[in-house]
Structure formats: structure tokens, C-alpha cells
Amino acid sequence: MAKKSKNTNELLGIQISPGWRKILLAIGLIFFALFFAHKILFINADLGRHIKNGEIIFSDFTPFHALVSTNYYSYTEPGYSLVNHHWGSGLIYFAIWKLFGFTGLSLFQVLLNVVTVFIFFKIAEKKSDFIYAFFFFIISIPLIAGRTEIRPEAFSYFLAGVFYFFLIQYSEGKISFQKILIILLPLQLLWVNLHIFFVFGIF
């Protein structure tokens, strides 16, 4: 892999030392994080509902079944059947909000997104090299940061990265199938209750 990276750099006529790579990546991640470091706008997001879901479940577990299987907040059709596929996110958001307020929620969202991008960047760097990975990371920031609200989908992006990382480890023979099951099955069970994109974990 190191030989491939060297040849690519020579082809482009660019040489970047390990130290500068760390600096450039840090600058890129900070720049990316700034897209998410803004005031929460409840007009554009469903954060209030997610927090309320967590509050209801934490305070009284009795309505849990109704909350996750019916149109709980409806005035006219509260018993209408549906699946609340992100109730777990509500528990996490409520706990963070209760302990650290909305500032804590914003910082959590920033950190989760930065870690997610870092995981995918390291995978891309390993499969190509730093120059290509960094270039496409920078030009894709506007697309990645197109939805900056605090939403459960952030958990899906993060877990997709984690799944992809471990599956690559398995494909390269660095981790056994048994360990993959031990790691990914509990994460899949968690993902099922965090966001509807859990289907990508199964794929």
C-alpha cells in the first residue's frame, strides 16, 4: 500500500510529509466541524420531538409501546399504527440535553460527524492515498454538510463507517468472522432502534 501511495504522489508530482498530512487533515476536519457549529433552529428540525420521546420513556415506561408503535402525538388518530424507528435516538438526545443542555447537544453532533468523516477518510486514504482522499474530502464538504441539524441520521452515518471499517478488516484477514459477529451484531441491534437506515447495516 505504501508503494502505491508513493507512485501516485510521484505521478502527481506532489510529496507531502507525514507531519503536514496531519496538519492538513486537522485543518480540514476543523473546517468541516464549523458547518455544524451553529444555533439550533427548531423550525427546520425535529429535535424537540426526539427529546420529548426520550423524556417520556425515561419518566414513565408505561406508554413506551404506544410511543414506538402508534401515532402517539396525533390528536385525531393517536391509535394509528406506525413504527417509531428512531426512539433510541430520543433517549440519547434527551440524556445529553438533560446533562449538558442544547450546547452539549450541538457539541455532541459536531463530534459525531467529525469522527464519522475521519473514519471514512482513513478508509479512503488506505484504499488510495492521502492526496486523493483529502481532495475528495474537501470538495465533498458542502454536500456532506448539507444537513446540519441534529438528526438521528447522524448515527446511521457513523455506524455505516464503523461497519465498513470492520468489514474491510475482515476482508483483509485481519479479524475473524466470529469477532465480526461479536462486534457488529450488538451494533446492528442498537442501530435498528436509532434510525431507519439500519437496513444498510444488514446489507
Image (tube, rainbow, N blue to C red):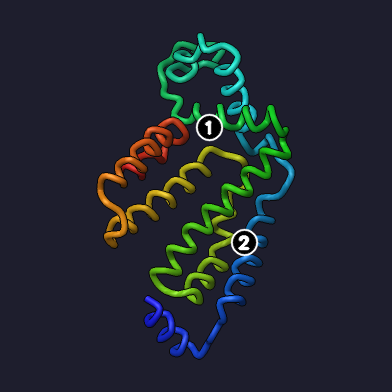
Residue 51 percent location from the top left of the image:
62, 27
State how far apart marks 2 and 1 are (Cα).
Answer: 24 Å
Residue 157 percent location from the top left of the image:
47, 48
Residue 44 lies in what quarter of the image?
top right
Secondary element type, mark 2: helix
Q: Give above or below for 146 relative to 76.
A: below
Residue ID at (57%, 47%) = 112
Q: Give above or below for 164 relative to 58.
A: below
Q: Give above or below for 88 relative to 123.
A: above
In depth, the one of 140 and 192 nearer the eye is 192
Residue 168 lies in what quarter of the image?
bottom left
Q: Mark 1 packing: few (<14 Cα in 10 Å), some, or many (20+)?
A: many
Q: Give above or below for 151 relative to 119.
A: above
- The circle on residue 29 is 2
Q: Is residue 22 left or right of 40 when viewed as pictured? A: left
Would residue 59 be seen by someone viewing this image from the given angle?
Answer: yes
> Label 1 sits on what residue type?
Ser
Residue ID at (61%, 40%) = 150
Residue 185 lies in what quarter of the image?
top left
Residue ID at (56%, 27%) = 91
Would residue 203 be seen by someone viewing this image from the given angle?
Answer: no
Report the residue marked by disc 1.
Answer: 89
Indicate the quadrant containing the N terminus: top left, top right, bottom left or bottom right.
Answer: bottom left
